[in-house]
Image (cartoon, rainbow, N blue to C red):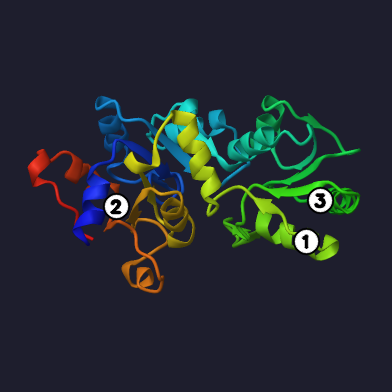
Amino acid sequence: MEAPRTQRLMGTNTWLTDMDGVLVREESMIPGAARLLELWRERGQRFLVLTNNSIYTPRDLSARLARSGLEVKESELWTSALATAEFLREQGAGHRAYVIGEAGLTTAMHEAGFVLTDTDCDYVVLGETRTYSFEAITKAIRLIGAGARFISTNPDTTGPSPEGPLPATGSVAALISAATHRQPYVVGKPNPMMFRSALNQIGAHSETTAMLGDRMDTDIIAGMEAGLATLLVLSGVTNREQVEQYPFRPSAVMESVQDLVNLLELPGPDRSVDG
């Protein structure tokens, strides 16, 4: 890895990290994840754990991570639902929204000051849910046709289940777009807007922040476009051969967060990054 990119990563003092595939895999903690969070806290380095999943509230996610052996405070979590609610609040273009989603999204919208309604809406906000109803989708189509702005929390087209893939937000957004001829504005990864809102949340600057992720097409490209150093870990969905298929590169590639822990625990002059 080129020296300037390596040096950029080692100058990091604030961190953004994806959750699934980086800190946890399904319900199990990835080795090194707990120690990494401990190191950041010991050194007073601010961080946020990011997820495109809009179903759960930060409290839900904190409890889920605790079951995996990771102690993450609610204030240390940033979801696409929170990023979407914050984005719309800052827009200041209305406060009435029709929301398709679960507690993670509806709670975030309520706390951002929105009235959730199905009439005279300024926005239709589409998020993740376990059960997309035909009635709700029909209502969304009609409201967008009547002038509501179309917003989506994330572009993911499928989600996992024990039986196989499930249609997710991106697939339902495509259905609504086909019926309305309107494309949604998508706030979550790979939109760098989600990273910028996370930086604002912890008062961090892009020049001294790194993004840890396991996906080139969301975590790494969005981190790069937000001006962050980027670290790809191979403990999730991406392998080394797949990295070569992309026209852009992360600042560094490691097998897992355990490698980052090993690096951070070395004396300063001995630190180097094997890309």
Tell me whether the residue at label 3 lies in contact with that at label 1, contact meaning CB atoms closer than 8 angstroms: no
| Label 3, label 1: how far apart the Cα atoms are | 16 Å
Residue 88 placement, left or right of 266: right
Tell me whether the residue at label 3 lies in contact with that at label 2, contact meaning CB atoms closer than 8 angstroms: no
The answer to which of marks 3 and 1 sits earlier in the sequence is 3
Q: Residue 200 versus residue 176: which sits nearer the camera?
A: 200
Residue at which label 3 appears = 133
| Label 3, label 2: how far apart the Cα atoms are | 39 Å
The answer to which of marks 2 and 1 sits earlier in the sequence is 1
Residue at which label 2 appears = 256
- Could you tell me which secondary element the residue under label 3 belongs to? loop
| Label 2, label 1: how far apart the Cα atoms are | 38 Å
Tell me whether the residue at label 2 lies in contact with that at label 1, contact meaning CB atoms closer than 8 angstroms: no
Residue 172, position as x, y percentages in the image: 73, 58
Mark 3 residue type = Ser
Judge the density around disc 2: few (<14), some (14-19), many (≥20) Cα neighbours within 10 Å.
many
Mark 1 residue type = Ser
- Could you tell me which secondary element the residue under label 1 belongs to? helix
The disc placed on residue 32 is none
Residue 226, position as x, y percentages in the image: 45, 49
Q: Residue at x 80, y 32 (%)?
A: 116
Where does the C terminus fall, quadrant-wise? bottom left
The answer to which of marks 3 and 2 sits earlier in the sequence is 3
Judge the density around disc 3: few (<14), some (14-19), many (≥20) Cα neighbours within 10 Å.
few
Residue at which label 1 appears = 177
Residue 168 placement, left or right of 268: right
- Could you tell me which secondary element the residue under label 2 belongs to? loop
Q: Residue at x 85, y 34 (%)?
A: 117
Mark 2 residue type = Ser
Residue 114, position as x, y percentages in the image: 75, 29
Whether residue 78 is visible here, answered yes or no, is: yes
